Image: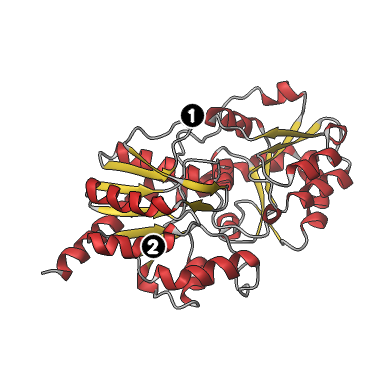
Amino acid sequence: MHIAWIGKKSPFCGNVTYSREITNALLEKKHQVSFLHFAQEESTPDNWPDCPEVYLPFLYKSQVYTIPTLKATKILKQSLRQLSPDLVHASLTLSPLDFLLPEICADLDLPLIATFHTPFASKGAKLKSGTQLLAYQLYAPFLVNYDRVIVFSQVQRDLLARLSVPAPNVAVIPNGVDVQKYSPGPSNLKAQWKANRIFVYQGRLAPEKNVESLLRAWKQSEMGPDSKLLIVGDGPLRPSLQPFYGSEYGIYWLGSVADEQRRIEILRGSDVFILPSLVEGLSLALLEAMACGLTCLATDVGADGEVLEKGAGVVMNPRQVVSQLRTLLPLFQDHPELSIVLGQKARQRVLERYTLSSNIKQLERLYFQVLEERRMSVV
């Protein structure tokens, strides 16, 4: 099968990781993949799939959204016509092209599938946050025109149903992790940082990630010199946070770590992973930490609470992160045996529900189902 994949190659974010992991897995399954993304990069990201690429010009690009040039639509349509794939799969990039894709693919008679990553708040939350209001309500009328929309949880599917996206159009396929690559293993991280206990945050440094609540709780908890908090990632809030939360409090800023093996080494050498987000989809960073056997503390937003439910981790209230972490941080500092038990349960949860191999099997079934529906519709 030939899949034309439309996604992101940079800057580093969950969408980039998703596109890289899924397309690599599809290539391993002997499918043909063509990758269409915004503009040629000066360097190739780590472990990028070896497949033909089409570069779409842009005016602006960030971790969150992209503004294409006027030529991008023409180049996209011409490229899809020349490639003549069996189907198009768009890992939606929050760009205007997302809204034009159904019309383009309809003109070319190509089946179109979308993965809708956009984060959301807790279960039962009203559509009141900026992200939800602008993304879910804006996208819902256009998602109806995709052959299928992939989301990561039933909660997200219900959210779209409330916005009149028909349930049969929406497929729940959770994110998946390569559990051979992301697994417990040796690391000299603690020797490097001269630490007995290492806590880690990995992700964007943006308002919705609520990292300042973690930093405040850490500072207030007065963690001892043998415990370190590593902040892995970059974003708009780093310049305003880093000067006030530094090494004098045992907090170290590693910036964006592009090398995947280094990120795995950091996870393997850490004890506790913390994700204090206000909104999420289904965090790949969380799943990667769980697969490496870390104790995971995450807020009950998006599908993250569902991932950790029933003892696979600790689920926090997004409105009480500081107070809850003031209790949890010393607890996991002083009781390493608790981290071992919860880390084992976290990896077992990923093995049961969130492996990349299971994700790809479900995705292949969906591809064949959509193609069969198209074939039957013209008979």
Q: Is residue 179 visible?
A: yes
Q: Which residue is mark 1?
A: 43
Callout 1: 10 Å neighbours few (<14), some, many (20+)? few
Q: Earlier in the sequence, mark 1 or mark 2?
A: 1
Q: Is 373 positioned to the left or the right of 39 in the image?
A: left
Residue at point 34%, 53% (across, down): 74
Residue furthest toward the left?
379
Quarter-wise, where is residue 31 in the image?
top left
Q: Which residue is mark 2?
A: 100
Q: Is residue 1 visible?
A: no
Alpha-carbon span between mark 1 and mark 2? 29 Å
Front residue of 83 and 290? 83
User: What secondary structure is marked by label 2?
Assistant: helix
Quarter-wise, where is residue 279 in the image?
bottom right
**x then y, percent, for residue 34:** 31, 42
Residue at point 68%, 59% (across, down): 278
Front residue of 228 and 73? 73
Quarter-wise, where is residue 111 in the image?
bottom left
Q: Which mark is residue 268?
A: none
**x then y, percent, for residue 204:** 64, 46
User: What secondary structure is marked by label 1?
Assistant: loop
**x then y, percent, for residue 283:** 56, 51
Residue 125 position (above or below residue 210): below
Residue type at mark 1 is Ser
Residue type at mark 2 is Leu
Callout 2: 10 Å neighbours few (<14), some, many (20+)? few
